[in-house]
Image (cartoon, coloured by chain):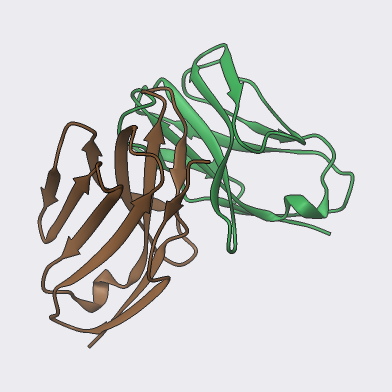
Amino acid sequence: KQEVTQIPAALSVPEGENLVLNCSFTDSAIYNLQWFRQDPGKGLTSLLLIQSSQREQTSGRLNASLDKSSGRSTLYIAASQPGDSATYLCAVRYGGSQGNLIFGKGTKLSVKP
Amino acid sequence: NAGVTQTPKFQVLKTGQSMTLQCAQDMNHEYMSWYRQDPGMGLRLIHYSVGAGITDQGEVPNGYNVSRSTTEDFPLRLLSAAPSQTSVYFCASSYGGGNEQFFGPGTRLTVL
């Protein structure tokens, strides 16, 4: 069964720290992987999309990497800010462009001022 | 662009009632989908559509019905609500299934 795991479930860091969020997946034959942010009571906001042929994507203070052989992706957040506090979700697409997204349960990040 | 919109934001139903959750997007996206989010379960796909007139089942389709008569709209119908359908429902869209997904703000549904 294709599964996506995010560890830890929750993380608390002081403002200014660089941090890494982890996502692992059981089947390396992915089509692409997407990182989302979800604020309490809100929808999901897309952060980064990595195609299976790519190794990393960057947007501002965010950098996502993909290692298919080890079944892992990381989301690196530089110089964290209290506004980064949210739940971060990883989703993997299998089975080509029409395949379904398999979501992890998320990492709840709290950045303390 | 309004992006992906969902109505209502909140809804309370009694067991056995039926209702339709509305989803619309103004980005001319071909691919639309419905997810439910439950505590400890993550998001799970209910139904999806790759274009007007084409729909298919996701991971948890039982108790739900969809149709896609236009590119813009993708309503989700609950045929006979059950307490197990208490959840937060999200609609998403993209240019194609494999492209970046954009999500709506969600509908919080409680079935008593």
* Residue at the spot 25% in from the left edge and 83% down from the top edge: A13
- Residue A78 location, quadrant: bottom left
Residue B68 seen anywhere in this rendered image of the structure: no
Decide which of A52, A60 is in the foreground and name it. A52
Residue displayed at 82% across by 39% down? B18
Compared with residue B4, is residue B105 higher up or lower down, i.e. above or below? below
**Quadrant in the rendering for residue A80:** bottom left
Quarter in which the C terminus of chain B is drawn: bottom right
Identify the residue at horizontal 19%, vertical 72% (top origin): A19
Q: Is residue A109 visible?
A: yes
Tell me residue A30's x, y (percent).
33, 34
Q: Is residue B64 left or right of residue A107?
A: right
Q: Is residue A33 above or below residue A97?
A: below
Which chain did the renderer colour green? B
Camera-side residue of A111 and A26? A26
Q: Position of residue A89 (x, y in %)?
A: 38, 56
Label the brown chain with its letter.
Answer: A
Q: Report x, y in % for residue B19.
A: 76, 39
